[in-house]
Amino acid sequence: MASVKLCDVLYAISDNDALELLKHVATADGSTSEVLRSKMKITRKQYYSRLYKLTKCGAIQKKDNAYFLTTLGKALYDAQAAIESALGNYWKIRAIDSIEIADSIPMEEQKRLIETLLGDQEIKNVLIKR
């Protein structure tokens, strides 16, 4: 099997329907194609097109007529959840950007402000690492 490139993976998850399908596979581990398709509000062709891309890039796999996330798929699902969380905190993150630009605020004070503004531990960890 040829190695998968980042652009292939990003292409496979590049629309809302593909992301929704990835979420359905993640939350309903072991669902058949019919069950997954019934949860989607897209045409049969659109469904199978997204399923093919996700399978080809290695995000999902089929076993015994059911679909499961691969290890790559689990990583994509977690990354997608983290990005959605960041987008949900967009204005707080923008405020943190403004704080970081201000040279007059000491690093320790910046960390305390980040802790105060954000409730999401995963996003806090990313921001504090910087």
Image (cartoon, rainbow, N blue to C red):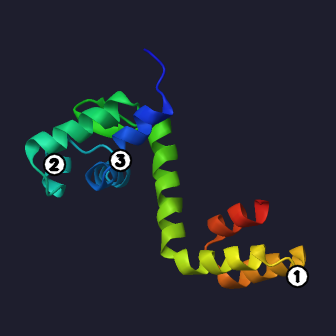
Q: Mark 3 points at which residue?
A: 14
Q: Is residue 59 above or below residue 104?
A: above
Q: In which quarter of the image is the N terminus?
A: top left
Q: Where does label 1 land, which residue?
A: 104
Neighbours of disc 1 within 10 Å: few (<14), some (14-19), many (20+): few
Amino acid type indicated by mark 1? Ser
Can residue 3 be seen in this snapshot?
Answer: yes
Q: Are marks 1 and 2 in contact (CB under 8 Å)?
A: no
Asked if the residue at tag 2 contacts the one at tag 3, i.e. Cβ–Cβ closer than 8 Å, the answer is: no
Between circles 1 and 2, the one closer to the viewer is: 1
SS state under label 1: loop
Earlier residue among tags 3 and 1: 3
Cα–Cα gap, marks 1 and 2:
54 Å
Disc 3 versus disc 2: distance between alpha carbons? Answer: 19 Å
Q: Is residue 75 above or below residue 3?
A: below
Q: Where is residue 42 in the image (x, y as percent from the top left)?
A: 13, 53
Considering depth in this image, is 4 or 68 the residue closer to the camera? 4
Which percent across, then down, holds residue 111? 81, 75
Counting residues from the N terminus, which is met first, the one under dot 1 or under dot 2?
2
Label 3 – label 1 distance at C-alpha = 40 Å
Amino acid type of the residue tagged 2 in the rendering: Arg
Q: Residue 37 carries which label?
A: 2
